[in-house]
Image (cartoon, rainbow, N blue to C red):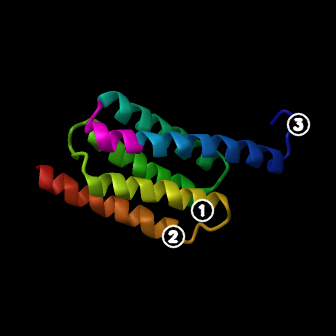
């Protein structure tokens, strides 16, 4: 890794993750006000995708899994399979908060969160069908 040790790489990851979480938080608030704005949804999807990949590279499985579930849900919003609603935005904002807590060392709530996102996707997908 070009002479960087794991702690230095982890510091870089945390900096990038903080920026991505800020992008997600701001974008979700914009989405709530703008409805299903394709550009906002695309930016949110990209941020979740990048966070997932970066966390996976750092072997931070709980963060990667939660970000992956968020990415999948945003992909379904992009495809028109899930509507933008207040509960959706709240669920995704909760993910931002839980991942932020995990970056601080508290990832206890992430597995439950990832399961709830999967459940939301199943429920929302069935309602849209």
Q: Where are the magenta residues, as a range?
A: 28-37
Q: Which residue is mark 3?
A: 3
Tag count: 3
For the residues carrying marks 2 and 1, which lies nearer the camera in this image? Answer: 1
The rendered magenta stretch, by its main secondary structure, is classed as helix
Q: Is residue 106 above or below residue 56?
A: below
Secondary structure at badge 3 equals loop
Can you identify the residue that label 2 sits on? Answer: 109
For the residues labelled 1 and 3, say whether their Cβ atoms are less than 8 Å apart.
no
Mark 1 — residue? 101
CA–CA distance in space, label 2 to label 1: 9 Å
Rendered-image quadrant of the N terminus: top right
Nearer the N terminus, badge 3 or badge 2?
A: 3
- Work out which residue is located at the far top of the displayed protein and give it: 39
- Is 106 rendered above or below residue 42? below
Q: Nearer the viewer, residue 100 or 66?
A: 100
In terms of secondary structure, where does tag 1 sit? helix
Between marks 3 and 2, how big is the CA–CA gap? Answer: 34 Å
Q: Using residue 68 as the reference point, say whether residue 81 is left or right of it.
A: left
**Position of residue 65 measured from the top left corner of the image (x, y, whole percent):** 49, 56
Query: Residue 12: percent from the left, percent from the top?
Result: 74, 42
Disc 2 residue crowd, few under 14, some 14–19, many 20+, Cα 10 Å: some
Q: Nearer the viewer, mark 3 or mark 2?
A: 2
Q: Is residue 16 left or right of residue 12?
A: left
At 30% from the left and 54% from the top, the residue drawn is 88
Q: Within 10 angstroms of label 1, few (less than 14), some, or many (20 or more) residues?
A: some
User: Quadrant location of residue 38?
Assistant: top left
Mark 3: few, some, or many residues within 10 Å (few <14, many ≥20)?
A: few
- Residue 53 marker: none
Q: Is residue 30 magenta?
A: yes
């Amino acid at each position: 890794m070009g002479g960087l040790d794991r702690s230095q790489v982890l510091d870089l990851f945390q900096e990038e993750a903080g920026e991505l979480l800020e992008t997600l938080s701001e974008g979700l608030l914009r989405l709530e006000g703008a409805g299903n704005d394709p550009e906002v949804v695309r930016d949110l999807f990209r941020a979740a995708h990048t966070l997932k990949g970066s966390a996976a590279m750092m072997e931070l499985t709980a963060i990667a899994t939660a970000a992956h579930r968020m990415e999948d849900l945003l992909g379904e919003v992009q495809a028109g399979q899930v509507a933008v609603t207040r509960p959706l935005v709240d669920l995704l904002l909760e993910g931002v908060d839980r991942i932020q807590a995990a970056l601080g060392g508290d990832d206890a709530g992430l597995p439950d969160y990832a399961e709830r996102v999967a459940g939301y996707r199943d429920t929302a997908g069935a309602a849209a069908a």
